[in-house]
Image (tube, grey):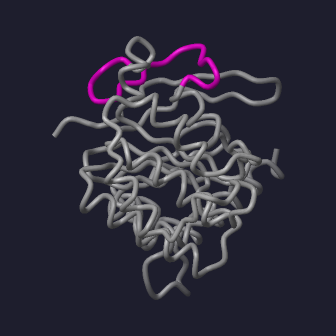
Amino acid sequence: MEAVLCVQGLCKHYPGFTLDHVSFSLAPNHIMGLIGKNGAGKSTTLKSILNMVSPESGIVKIFEKDFYQYEKECKQRIGVVFGGIDFYPLKKLSSITAVTQKFYTDWDQEQYQKYIKRFALDERKKFKELSNGMKVKYLLTLALSHHAELLILDEPTSGLDPVSREELLYIFRQIVKNENCSILFSTHITSDLDKCADDITYIQGGRVLKSADKVTFLRSFEHLKTPEDTGPLTLEEIMLRTERSEWDDEAAV
């Protein structure tokens, strides 16, 4: 099974922060969660993958093609949603759609209308008038309307209430099941991934600490368990204990 997305040795330097040889791969029809505390490098990783910032080194292959060499072609087959970004805030959804659809050769108006109705979106509204959850749904609608086979999402559930988050997670699972699509999404809300992720990639301080299917990932951190733990550790507990051990190491220096 060839990877939909393969990242090898991705590096990006900023003053005070380095994305250090990040590598992982995403299988078809899988959901991968990219976890790490704020500032760990999740957004930098996604932006480097998409060439929104220029990495100093590394290889990104999407659908087995060098993304940086075939960027325009690959972008026809991917959808990107970055949480917290206002997307033409004063424009009506209908106007944004009219511009967006011109960029995609496989735009499917019937598919677009299906998701507009499913998500109960009002095209007469301005983007800024939407709730955070509805903004994400609209951006997903645009991505799915050109039959994106890979969705790259940065903190899509951040700032949403629990009910809206649960609804989005259900939508993600349905998309992967029904739309021949894979999803990579970053989040610091690890409980989201307990419910929907197939694979986990954990970034700490700009480096990949572990990348594996969820079962293997959880097993690899069993050394963090204490005698008081009666069941398997959750992703949240793994992150808390890993970061705590990092703090302890730093304090000991």
Q: Residue furthest left?
A: 1
- Residue drawn at point x = 62 percent, y = 17 percent: 54
Q: Position of residue 171 (x, y in %)?
A: 41, 67
Number of marks: 0
Instruction: Please identify the quadrant where the N terminus is shown.
Output: top left
- Residue drawn at point x = 41 percent, y = 52 percent: 32
In the foreground, 102 or 5: 102
- Residue drawn at point x = 52 percent, y = 45 percent: 209
Q: Position of residue 150 (x, y in %)?
A: 37, 42
Q: Position of residue 252 (x, y in %)?
A: 81, 50
Q: Residue furthest front?
A: 124
Q: Which residues are magenta?
A: 51-66
Instruction: Please identify the quadrant where the C terminus is shown.
Output: top right
Q: Position of residue 235 (x, y in %)?
A: 52, 67
Q: Is residue 91 left or right of residue 26?
A: right
Looking at the image, is 102 positioned above or below residue 26? Answer: above
Q: Is residue 120 left or right of residue 15?
A: left
Q: Is residue 52 magenta?
A: yes
